[in-house]
Image (cartoon, coloured by chain):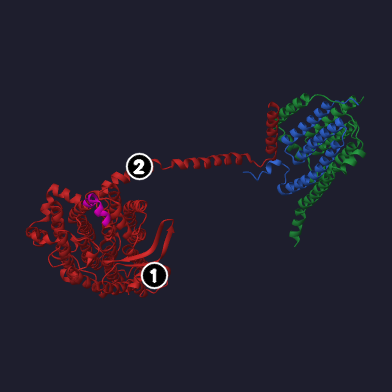
Chain colours: A red, B blue, C green
Amino acid sequence: MIELLGWVPLLPFLGFLILVLAGDWLSKPLTPWIGAGSVGVSALLTALIGAEFLNGAMPPYRLVLGSWMTVDNLSVPFGFYLDALSMTMLFVVTGVGFLIHVYSAEFMESDPGYARFFAYMNLFVSAMLVLVLADNLVLLYLGWEGVGLGSYLLIGFWYEDPNNGYAARKAFVMTRVGDTSMAIGLFLLFTQLHTLDIQSVTIQAASQWTPGTVLPVAAAALLLGGAVGKSAQLPLQSWLPDAMAGPTPVSALIHAATMVTAGVYLIARTHALFMLAPSVQFIVAVVGAVTLLMAGCSALAQTDIKRILAYSTISQIGYMFLALGVGAWSAAIFHLLTHAFFKALLFLAAGVVILCFHHEHNIFKMGGLRKSMPVAFWSFMIGSAALAGLPFTSGYYSKHEILLAAFQSSPVLWTAGCLGALITGLYSFRLVFVAFFGSQHSVIEKSPGWRMSAPLLLLCILALLGGMLRIPLASVFPVLTAEENLHDFNAVSAITVAAPFIGVLVAGLFYLTGTFSPQRLESLVWIKQLQRFFFSGWGMDAFYNMLLVQPFKTIARLNKNDIVDSIYSGVAFLSLTFHRLFSSLQTGRVRWYASSMVFGAVVIIAIGWLS
Amino acid sequence: MNGIPMELGLLLSAVLFVLGLIGVMVRRNLIMILMSLEVMLNATGLAFIVAGSRWGQADGQIMFLLILTLAAAEVGVGLGLALQIFHRFHTLDADSVNEMHG
Amino acid sequence: MMLILFYIASAVAVFATLMMITRLNAVHGLLYLILSLLAVGVLFFLLGAHFAAVLEVIIYAGAIMVLFVFVIMMLNQGQKTVDQERSWLQPATWIGPSLLALILFAELLIVIVLGGSAETGQLVDSKHVAIALYGPYLLAVELASMLLLAGLVGAYHLGKPMIKKTWGKKS
């Protein structure tokens, strides 16, 4: 079975080709069969390969399909590499991806760009699979850019609205900043180590570089730049909330479950480099901690259901970075896995609410949807519980592991994580209480069909029980040295468990029982200002606008008539002037021509005589 | 030698040439312009004859012969054009036929 | 003797040309032009170019001028044209071009005077001309005949559309 690994990314790509080339001629019922079907077969293959892989002794499997380029001492094959890490990612991408495709089949049914949507989705899934399976960094980069392209196309899917195009460009440009850094990192690795194969890079870096010196620090920092851009971490996080302009399944697939976790995957994949650069690894942890707090605070102030989820995504990826930074590699990947389940669940449930509720995004206009939308309500309950990390949901296990590991590394990071957990509980249940409890403001339009409900139910189960999944990542990552001491921190453990409950409690007091009034709180001026500050995502957009966009615009305005171009337009202007001059000489009068010739003769003779 | 200085012959040629030139530039009647052109061609021919006479060579006369041929062809075509223009515009005014201007 | 004849013929040629370019009536101008051509023919004779002199009289003053006569008769220039010519020949219109032409003349004068003086009058008889024509100048003769043919065809075509028009009306 494992020999068929190549078909896993190939099938969605074939689906993309069919839909792109023949999308207009396919009948509408056939389109989702191709779009979701290709990913479905991929998921099936993955499951079969996974069963075989996990049952066996699990030596990493390598499959080379052919040579992409061979120049001098650079050789880049189309090679796939399967170990426990990429196996996990495969499960996430194909499994969650398939569920989201099935969901989209109903969600996008009335959209005129039905086939186009599935084509983009398939392209994205295919690129993501290439990314996680690649055995060398160049192929990984191909997938990396491929998912960037898919993300751009899907954010701007409803391109008639210029705002969506703007959001798509913003996402594309901001992630490109990180990608450039990553490309430079790849150049550095190649010039120093003369290979881009991930395994040989790992081995050679360990043997050639001493930890903490300039080269590994530079390489790790540059790769971190790429990861930060893709995973929407500080300072490149502000594109993700705007990326919610795309259709909701897109937000679920790309901006929650898969693409944004690519940065986490990259760091985990090249963890050997980061371990050679402890300072960069510490930065990873700090970036994660700061991002999770910032994004959590921003999520508190949002009213748009999808923006709340977007900020929560940034925050949760912050947790993963924190885990990576403290060396809890498998905890990070575990959280990635569970996060993919519950965040996809939340987004898809949000899609149900939005679709059935007049395309309304504002949670304060919803209210009381508990009874009219049981499926969405229970999905949200379970998803939010997992997001907040309430005990016995999947999120609890992964987040708990991360926080304990963080405590071992630094109590400050742990404090930030616990504070973040509290905030997570607060904002996630604020969303649930506001949107689903209280009085209903208006009636819903319709109920979701089976193609939307079934993926939700499946994801509910996964979000609840996903914590039981134990991916044997120990074969890939070094085990934390002090693992056995983890259980000594009883107080720490208790606080970690209690933090989200406090958040949920506060949210309940504010929005469920009405013991405290949010309005009274907002009447305080500094709270109001703080809320506005959080609402704008800590003013990052305004900051970048002032720092980069405005100077650029000013330069552009100053150079509106392109100084370099003025030479060429000057030539054009000159020839135009001469053209006008000469053309005015063409009077059509024979006598005028004769006189001109005489004048010319006079001048020529004078010249000949004078010289 | 018969005592006609060459520069006098050339001078006469120049005078006739300039007179023809003035005719071409001043007159508006197409027929008159053609006639002035004949004067100019003739003046050029005279210059060749003078030079041929100065050196005692036949080339001068041959050049005149060629100019004569040119004049004949030119007059044929030019008068044809004049007829055509008169037919279309009902005038021989060279200035009124300025449709082709830039 | 020759010099006196030269001066007389030159005076006649310049005078006739001057009259020609100032005549209002095209027929008068044409007559003065013929006079000028004949005077130049005399000059050719005086310069020893007998063959050229004969051609000047027969072809220039004879054949080519006859063409002009035909055309002028065809176009039937009447008193109306004379009045028009008078209105065209205002000093404002001719002073500028004349000055320009005079500048050119002055330049030519300087060039000629600076060129120094030499005697002319070496007789070149028609036999020598003929030998040169059908010797080294054979190609030029052929080309000249081509030119004449082209002129002939051109003149024929330019005259044709008038016939065509009457055709179109009839059919």
Q: Do the residues labelled 2 and 1 touch (CB within 8 Å)?
A: no
Which of the two residues, C103 or A335, is positioned nearer the viewer here?
A335
Q: In this view, does C6 lie above or below A578?
A: above
Q: Where is residue C115 in the image (x, y as percent from the top left)?
A: 78, 26
Considering the image in quadrants, where does the N terminus of chain A appear? bottom left
Q: How crowded is mark 2: few (under 14 residues within 10 Å), some or many (20 or more)?
A: few
Give me the C-alpha separation between circle 2 and circle 1.
Answer: 46 Å
As for residue B71 lying within the magenta part, the answer is no
Which of the two residues, A186 or B87, is positioned nearer the viewer here?
A186
Considering the image in quadrants, where does the C terminus of chain A appear? top right
Q: In this view, does A47 lie above or below A579?
A: below
Prevailing SS of the magenta stretch: helix
Same-subunit check for callouts 2 and 1: yes
Q: Position of residue A56 (x, y in %)?
A: 26, 73
Q: As shown in the figure, which amino acid type bears the numbered disc 1?
A: Leu
Q: Mark 1 points at which residue?
A: A14
Residue placed furthest toward the front: A207
Residue A59 visible at all:
yes
Q: Position of residue A479 (x, y in %)?
A: 19, 61
Q: Is residue B65 left or right of residue A459?
A: right
Range drawn in magenta: A272-283
Q: Name the residue under label 2.
A: A554
Q: Is residue A452 left or right of residue A519?
A: right
Q: Where is residue C41 in the image (x, y as percent from the top left)?
A: 88, 34
Disc 1: host chain: A
Q: In this view, does C137 lie to the left or right of C103?
A: right
Q: How crowded is mark 1: few (under 14 residues within 10 Å), some or many (20 or more)?
A: some
Q: In this view, does A63 lie to the left or right of C22?
A: left
Disc 2: host chain: A
Q: In which quarter of the image is residue A23?
A: bottom left
